[in-house]
């Protein structure tokens, strides 16, 4: 199997579709942030888009597995600084904002200028997109830290299901790069909200204010709660919560009543997890993040030193 490019037509964006597999279909849309917008196994769609693809592309919506770069979730406001560089996002056109007007989910949700390649290796098909950040003045204005971003999706069949692995590489140029990226997978194993079950490791919840921003004390420390395990039936529970993981890698999943399981397996770089499962949803989002929400605003970020790279990966694993 391999990914083949399909050109834009009838409002559907250019995309890469998996071919040569009998019971697996996958679609990656570069202009939606190297988004894995669809993963179908044995006729069952495992990801959720809020709208048909053409309509989805016309709005700054999230769905599928969108990339949140260079920051995940929201910032505290339009201003942030890093190592003496001060940035004001107030004049940035087209910035996605939340209901409070806060900058949200980065700059690439509808970015088109990826350099894309695809191919196949032993037992898997892959598609990769790359952005040379310094080549794009609009990106540099909002995030003035030159780097090369590479995103690679690889799909493989397993004896028990399918795995989709994402490699997220940030290659710093002549300056340090703050790394606050994340991903927002909409995992839908099947069934309504109250029949789904969440499965996570023990983690430390972070207190959030009414706008979803982390609470920090006078010294700037996060208001961490005691370690807890949010696993169990969703039932009447809803989530939009931030957790600090052990920092040793983690596995979390969403399970349907019929036993269908979608797990997300993250390497140790993804120290933070946001869980999002709103009322009435037939999905749950288990979001790997390199830094906490608003970390770029708060000066609390992972750092890729100049001349080095960070390669973080996670795998979405489906088993029936």
Image (tube, helix red, strand yellow):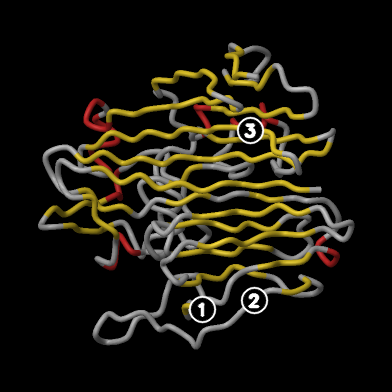
For disc 2, the neighbor class at 10 Å (few under 14, some 14 to 19, many from 20) is some
Q: Is 313 displayed left or right of 162 in the figure?
A: left
Image quarter of the N terminus: top right
Mark 1 → mark 3, Cα distance in angstroms: 33 Å
Mark 3 → mark 2, Cα distance in angstroms: 30 Å
Quarter of the image for residue 171 reads top left
Q: Residue at x 48, y 77 (%)?
A: 208
Query: Which residue is label 1 attached to?
Result: 205
Q: Residue at x 20, y 43 (%)?
A: 308
Q: Is 195 displayed left or right of 311 in the figure?
A: right
User: Where residue 34 appears, x then y in whole percent?
Assistant: 50, 32
Query: Which residue is label 3 attached to?
Result: 156
User: Where residue 138 appears, x then y in whole percent?
Assistant: 28, 33
Q: Secondary structure at mark 3?
A: strand
Q: Secondary structure at mark 1?
A: strand
For the residues bearing labels 1 and 2, Cβ distance under 8 angstroms: yes
**Mark earlier in primary sequence (1, 2):** 1
Query: Which residue is label 2 attached to?
Result: 230
Of marks 3 and 2, the one in the foreground: 3
User: Where residue 178 appears, x then y in whole percent?
Assistant: 25, 53
User: Where residue 272 appears, x then y in whole percent?
Assistant: 45, 64
Q: Residue at x 37, y 39 (%)?
A: 93
- As drawn, which residue projects farthest toward the right? 258
**Mark earlier in primary sequence (3, 2):** 3
Q: Is residue 174 above or below residue 28?
A: below
**Mark earlier in primary sequence (1, 3):** 3
Q: Is residue 168 above or below residue 196?
A: above
Q: Is residue 211 above or below residue 4?
A: below
Q: Is residue 146 above or below residue 244?
A: above
């Amino acid at each position: 199997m391999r990914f083949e490019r399909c050109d834009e037509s009838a409002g559907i964006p250019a995309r890469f579709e998996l071919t040569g597999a009998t019971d697996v279909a996958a679609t990656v849309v570069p202009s939606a942030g190297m988004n894995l917008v669809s993963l179908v196994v044995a006729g069952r769609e495992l990801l959720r888009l809020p709208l048909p693809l053409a309509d989805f592309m016309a709005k700054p919506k999230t769905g599928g597995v969108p990339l949140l770069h260079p920051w995940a979730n929201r910032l505290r406001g339009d201003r942030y600084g890093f190592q003496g560089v001060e940035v004001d996002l107030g004049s940035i056109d087209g910035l996605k904002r939340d209901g409070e007007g806060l900058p949200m989910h980065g700059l690439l949700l509808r970015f088109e200028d990826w350099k894309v390649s695809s191919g196949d290796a032993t037992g898997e098909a892959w598609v990769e997109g790359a952005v040379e950040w310094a080549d794009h003045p609009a990106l540099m204005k909002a995030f003035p830290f030159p780097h090369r971003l590479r995103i690679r999706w690889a799909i493989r069949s397993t004896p028990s299901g399918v795995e989709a692995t994402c490699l997220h590489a940030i290659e710093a140029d002549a300056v340090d790069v703050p790394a606050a990226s994340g991903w927002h997978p909409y995992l839908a194993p099947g069934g309504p909200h109250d029949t789904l079950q969440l499965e996570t490791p023990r983690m430390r919840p972070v207190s959030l204010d009414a706008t979803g921003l982390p609470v920090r004390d006078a010294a700037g420390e996060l208001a961490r709660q005691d370690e807890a395990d949010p696993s169990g039936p969703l039932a009447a529970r809803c989530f939009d919560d931030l957790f600090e993981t052990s920092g040793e890698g983690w596995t979390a999943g969403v399970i349907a009543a019929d036993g269908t399981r979608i797990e997300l397996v993250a390497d140790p770089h993804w120290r933070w997890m946001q869980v999002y499962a709103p009322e009435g949803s037939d999905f749950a989002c288990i979001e790997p993040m390199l830094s906490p929400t608003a970390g770029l605003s708060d000066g609390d970020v992972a750092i890729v030193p100049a001349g080095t790279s960070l390669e973080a990966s996670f795998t979405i694993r489906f088993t029936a």
